[in-house]
DNA sequence: TTTTGAGTTGTTCGA
DNA sequence: GTCGAACAACTCAAA
C-alpha cells in the first residue's frame, strides 16, 4: 500500500455517509487530505448565489466538525482548482485524487481537463444521483425528453445500497494549510439578511437526516395530497440538503423503502415522493444532455416570443408587490426563508412569465440568487417547463389563476397571513382577492389598498388573454 | 417505417 | 355547486 496520501475533493457532497469517493479513498488506507475549494471564478454566469453562500458556510462548518470527530481535518482553499490541486499535490506528495461527479457544464469541462492534466491517479464516482444521466436511455439510445417514460425506465434499473460513514478518518500526512472559513465572506453582514434563515434550517448531514426522519414519521403518508398545501410545511424540505449533498438520493430512497417494509400503507406516499426525486434526476439528465438549458430556450420557437422589458413589474414581482396575495406571500417567503413551496414556485413563475410576459431567464436569475437550494439543473429545467419552452412542457393554455390557486391550496389564508401581515385581519372570503372586498370590509381589516397593500399590477383576465395571444404568435399556426 | 397512445401540477365556459 | 368539454398542434417513445 502506498504511503502517498490521497486527496478527497468535496464539492456538492458535503457528507460522510454514502460518499463513494470518500469511502473509496478510506479503503486505500492512505493518509487522507480532505479538501474543499471555493471557486468563484470558473462558473462565470452561474457562480453560487447569495442565499446559497449562507448555506455553504453552515454546511462546511458542519462537515468540518463531523470530520474532526472522526479524526480527520477539512482543508479549505479558495481559487481555481486547476491551480490549487497541482500545487497541493506537489506540496503533499499526494498520489491520488477522488471526487464525486458534478453535472453542470462548467464542472464537467473543469473535471475533464483535470483528469487529463493531473499526472496522478484520478477517480470519479456517482455520489449525487440514483442513476447517471447516461444510464437512462431510450431503446434507441437517445436521452429521454419526457418525464414519465424516463422515470418508468429508471425504476427498472438497480440502485446500489447506501454506504456507511467511515468509522475513522486518517489524519493528513502533514499539516495542510487551510483558509479560515470566516475569511471567505460567505455570510452576509451589514445587513445580515440571512438571520431569518437560522430558525428555519439546520444545514449539515445531521440536519438532513433529521429532516428525512421527520418527513417519514409525519408527512409521507399524506404526501400525495398534502404536498400541494402552501402552509404548514407539508413537504420534505430536503432540497437544500440534496443540492449540497448532505444527504444522497440513494440514502433517501433506502430510508423510505425501509419505512414501507414496516408500514405498507406508506407505499402510495413513498411512490409519489420518489417520483419527485425522479424529477431531480430528470432535470440533471436534461442539463447533461442539453448544456445550454440554463441560458437558451430548449424549444427554439420560443426565440421569437415577444417578451416585455418591464423593470418596474419585475421589481414588483421580486419584492412581492404584485397585488396578488398568493404571489406576494410566496415571494416574501422566498426572501425571508431562502426557499419557497413547490406549488408557490409554479404560481410565481407562471405569473412572471404569463401575466407579466417577462423572460423566464429573469426569474431564473432571481431564484438563483435567493434560493438556498438553487440548483442549475432544477432551476433551468423548471423555469423552462413553466414557460413552455422546455422539455415535456406544460400545454400553452395552462396559465395559473393566482386567485383560484390561492383559494384551492391556501383555503384558510394562513399562508398569505403569515407572509403578508398587512392582510392578517382580512376575512377568508377576500384574502386572495382584496380588490373585490367591500370598502367596509377593508376598513374593518385596517387595509387601504394602495397604502397598506398594492392594487393588482395587472388584471388577470386581460393578462391571460395577452399571454394566449403572445403564445399564438409563436405557434406553428400563427 | 408507420402507427398509436400519451404527455406533473390548469382554467373557463356552458349545461 | 358540479361536471365535462374545449383549449393546438406536436413530439415522444415504443410497438
Image (cartoon, coloured by chain):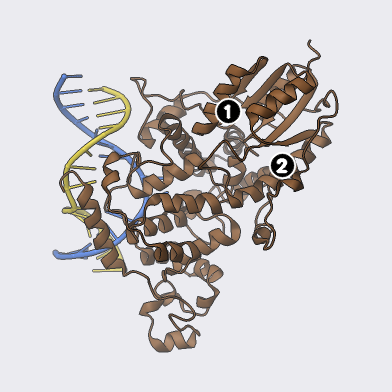
Chain colours: A brown, B blue, C yellow
Where's the N terminus of chain A, which quadrant?
Answer: top right
Res A10 quadrant in image = top right
Q: Chain of mark 2?
A: A
Work out whether residue B9 or residue A73 is closer to the camera in this orientation and state it: A73
Q: Chain of mark 1?
A: A
Q: Residue A193's spot in the image, x, y percent?
A: 64, 61
Residue A376 is marked as none
Q: Residue at x 43, y 33 (%)?
A: A291
SS at badge 2: helix
Residue A60 is marked as 2
In this view of the protein, can residue A268 be seen by the observer?
no
Q: Residue A385's spot in the image, x, y percent?
A: 37, 45
Classify residue A243 as left or right of residue A68.
left
Work out whether residue C1 or residue A213 is closer to the camera in this orientation and state it: A213
In this view of the protein, can residue A65 be seen by the observer?
yes
Q: Residue at x 28, y 62 (%)?
A: A464
Q: Check the image and report above or below for A411 versus A64.
A: below
Q: Which residue, given by chain and number where applicable, does mark 1 sit on?
A: A101
Q: Check the image and report above or below for A350 versus A269.
A: below
SS at badge 1: loop
Res A430 quadrant in image = bottom left
Whole-Å distance between the Cαs marked 1 and 2?
A: 18 Å
Classify residue A230 as left or right of residue A336.
left
Q: Residue at x 82, y 32 (%)?
A: A70
Local crowd size for mark 1, using a 10 Å CA cut-off: few (<14), some (14–19), many (≥20): many
Local crowd size for mark 2, using a 10 Å CA cut-off: few (<14), some (14–19), many (≥20): many
Amino acid at each position: 500500500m502506498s504511503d502517498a496520501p490521497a486527496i478527497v475533493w468535496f464539492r456538492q457532497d458535503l457528507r460522510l455517509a454514502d460518499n463513494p469517493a470518500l469511502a473509496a479513498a478510506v479503503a486505500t488506507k492512505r493518509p487522507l487530505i480532505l479538501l474543499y475549494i471555493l471557486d468563484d471564478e470558473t462558473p462565470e454566469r452561474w457562480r453560487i448565489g447569495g442565499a446559497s453562500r449562507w448555506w455553504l458556510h453552515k454546511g462546511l462548518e458542519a462537515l468540518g466538525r463531523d470530520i474532526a470527530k472522526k479524526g480527520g481535518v477539512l482543508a479549505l482553499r479558495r481559487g481555481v482548482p486547476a491551480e490549487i490541486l497541482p500545487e497541493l499535490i506537489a506540496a503533499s506528495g499526494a498520489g491520488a485524487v477522488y471526487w464525486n461527479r458534478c453535472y453542470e457544464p462548467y464542472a464537467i469541462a473543469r473535471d475533464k481537463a483535470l483528469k487529463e492534466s493531473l499526472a496522478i491517479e484520478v477517480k470519479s464516482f456517482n455520489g449525487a444521483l440514483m442513476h447517471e444521466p447516461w444510464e437512462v436511455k431510450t431503446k434507441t439510445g437517445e436521452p429521454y425528453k419526457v418525464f414519465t417514460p424516463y422515470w418508468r425506465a429508471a425504476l427498472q434499473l438497480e440502485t446500489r445500497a447506501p454506504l456507511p460513514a467511515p468509522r475513522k478518518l486518517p489524519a493528513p500526512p502533514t499539516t495542510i494549510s487551510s483558509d479560515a472559513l470566516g475569511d471567505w465572506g460567505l455570510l452576509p453582514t451589514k445587513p445580515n439578511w440571512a438571520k431569518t434563515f437560522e430558525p428555519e434550517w439546520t444545514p449539515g448531514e445531521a440536519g438532513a437526516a433529521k429532516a428525512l426522519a421527520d418527513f417519514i414519521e409525519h408527512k409521507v403518508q399524506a404526501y400525495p395530497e398534502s404536498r400541494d398545501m402552501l402552509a404548514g410545511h407539508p413537504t420534505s424540505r430536503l432540497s437544500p440538503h440534496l443540492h449540497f449533498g448532505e444527504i444522497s438520493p440513494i440514502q433517501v430512497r433506502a430510508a423510505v423503502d425501509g419505512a414501507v417494509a414496516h408500514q405498507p400503507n406508506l407505499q402510495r406516499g413513498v411512490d409519489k415522493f420518489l417520483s419527485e426525486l425522479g424529477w431531480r434526476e430528470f432535470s440533471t439528465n436534461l442539463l447533461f444532455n442539453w448544456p445550454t438549458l440554463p441560458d437558451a430556450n430548449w424549444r427554439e420557437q420560443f426565440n421569437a416570443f415577444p417578451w416585455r422589458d418591464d423593470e418596474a413589474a419585475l421589481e414588483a414581482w421580486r419584492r412581492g408587490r404584485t397585488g396578488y396575495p398568493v404571489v406576494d406571500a410566496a415571494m416574501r417567503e422566498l426572501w425571508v426563508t431562502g426557499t419557497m413551496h413547490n406549488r408557490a414556485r409554479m404560481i410565481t413563475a407562471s405569473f412572471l412569465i404569463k401575466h407579466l410576459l417577462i423572460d423566464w431567464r429573469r426569474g431564473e436569475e432571481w431564484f438563483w440568487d435567493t434560493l438556498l437550494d438553487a440548483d442549475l439543473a432544477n432551476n433551468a429545467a423548471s423555469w423552462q417547463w413553466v414557460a413552455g419552452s422546455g422539455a415535456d412542457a406544460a400545454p400553452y393554455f395552462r396559465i395559473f389563476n393566482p386567485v383560484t390557486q390561492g383559494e384551492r391550496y391556501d383555503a384558510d389564508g394562513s399562508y398569505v397571513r403569515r407572509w403578508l401581515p398587512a392582510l392578517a385581519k382580512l376575512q377568508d372570503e377576500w384574502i386572495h382577492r382584496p380588490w373585490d372586498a367591500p370598502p367596509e370590509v377593508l376598513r374593518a381589516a385596517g387595509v387601504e389598498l394602495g397604502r397598506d397593500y398594492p392594487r393588482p399590477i395587472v388584471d388577470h383576465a386581460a393578462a391571460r388573454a395577452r399571454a394566449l395571444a403572445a403564445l399564438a404568435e409563436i405557434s406553428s399556426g400563427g
